[in-house]
Image (cartoon, rainbow, N blue to C red):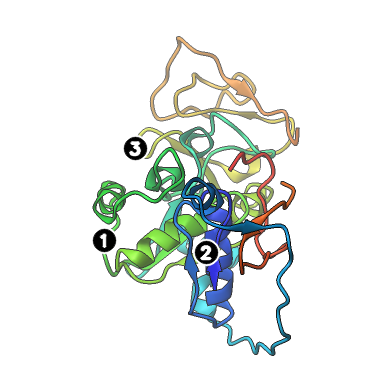
């Protein structure tokens, strides 16, 4: 199977991950995707291919998928053997400056390795050397057990795809990701940058409560809670609570349909 999307990005890597999770390893991603294919003058068609029926027997690989209980256990006991947690979203969502859902920030202890840092502006994958530099800058070393997440388990697969190609091994995808974790007020979150952020006490995080960012001043709604360094030049931010068509395709290719799930609001 060769998977592609418009740029060879995380929708294609989501299908790559899903097939491998179900036991089908013979899958690749078309670098540059549809845009690169068309730009190269490759043949395209509007006709749907006539594909003979086949029987596929899934052989699940549980190690490639992590659940919320797995992540919660790692956060509670981040000792030897605990996986490195990777947040594949953009910096604004990681720090909590931008929210998608009732809470912002990231899973405590997660390192930031945005999936978009692994690809060029045109959507093609960066060279393996450039990808390795990005991964090493995030503190990931070969052999580390890894769990990656994003908002809905899609963008995270881009990081897992890169780690696989670099020989770092097969990490797990936290499929529920922030769409699940952020909704669970019984689970802790951290805002800001590691070393400058703080872990938000679970009882304080609820719709209508005030939440302090790591770079914010004391929360007027919760004067007993302060960040690890007070900044009087900025004010706290209130928590408001919850607040593509398929056209032509490369000759011989089939559409994955809904196999890859789009994350709401994601432009890629």
Q: Nearer the viewer, residue 222 or 14?
A: 14
Q: Nearer the viewer, mark 3 or mark 1?
A: 1
Question: For residue 266, what is the image quadrant?
Answer: top right
Q: Is residue 56 above or below residue 30?
A: below
Q: Earlier in the sequence, mark 1 or mark 2?
A: 1
Look at 72% across and 53% down and name the residue there. Answer: 246
Q: Secondary structure at mark 1?
A: loop
Secondary structure, mark 3, is loop
Q: Which residue is mark 2?
A: 173
Q: Is residue 58 above or below residue 177?
A: below
The residue labelled by disc 1 is: 141
Q: Position of residue 69 (x, y in %)?
A: 58, 66
Cα separation, mark 1 vs mark 2, equals: 18 Å
Q: Give the position of the C terminus as an image quadrant.
A: top right
Quarter of the rendering containing residue 141 = bottom left
Mark 2 or mark 3, whichever is nearer to me: 2
Residue 89's x, y, as percent?
Answer: 51, 44
* Mark 3 and mark 1 residues within 8 Å of each other at the beta carbon: no
Asked whether, in this view, residue 190 is left or right of residue 205, the answer is left
Asked if residue 212 is positioned above or below residue 141 in the image, the reply reads above
Quadrant position of the N terminus in the picture: bottom right
The disc at residue 166 is: none
Q: Position of residue 224 (x, y in %)?
A: 55, 27
Please say if the residues under marks 1 and 2 sit with CB atoms less than 8 Å apart.
no
- Residue occupied by mark 3: 195
Q: Earlier in the sequence, mark 2 or mark 3?
A: 2
């Amino acid at each position: 199977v060769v998977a592609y999307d418009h740029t060879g990005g995380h929708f294609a890597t989501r299908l790559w991950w899903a097939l491998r999770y179900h036991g089908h390893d013979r899958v690749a991603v078309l670098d540059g995707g549809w845009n690169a294919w068309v730009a190269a003058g490759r043949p395209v068609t509007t006709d749907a291919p006539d594909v003979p029926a086949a029987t596929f027997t899934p052989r699940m690989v549980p190690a490639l998928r992590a659940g919320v209980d797995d992540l919660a256990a790692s956060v509670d006991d981040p000792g030897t053997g605990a996986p490195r947690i990777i947040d594949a979203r953009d910096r604004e969502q990681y720090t909590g400056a931008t929210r998608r859902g009732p809470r912002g920030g990231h899973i405590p202890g997660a390192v930031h390795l945005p999936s978009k840092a692994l690809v060029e502006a045109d959507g093609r994958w960066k060279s393996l050397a450039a990808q390795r530099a990005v991964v090493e800058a995030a503190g990931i070393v070969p052999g580390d057990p890894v769990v990656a997440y994003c908002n809905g388990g899609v963008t995270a697969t881009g990081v897992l795809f890169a780690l696989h190609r670099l020989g770092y091994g097969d990490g797990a995808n936290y499929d529920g990701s922030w769409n699940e974790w952020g909704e669970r007020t019984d689970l802790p979150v951290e805002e800001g940058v590691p070393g400058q952020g703080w872990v938000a006490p679970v009882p304080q995080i609820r719709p209508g409560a005030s939440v302090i960012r790591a770079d914010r001043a004391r929360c007027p709604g919760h004067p007993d809670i302060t960040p690890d360094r007070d900044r009087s030049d900025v004010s706290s931010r209130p928590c408001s609570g919850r607040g593509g068509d398929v056209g032509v395709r490369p000759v011989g290719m089939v559409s994955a349909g809904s196999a890859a799930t789009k994350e709401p609001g994601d432009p890629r």
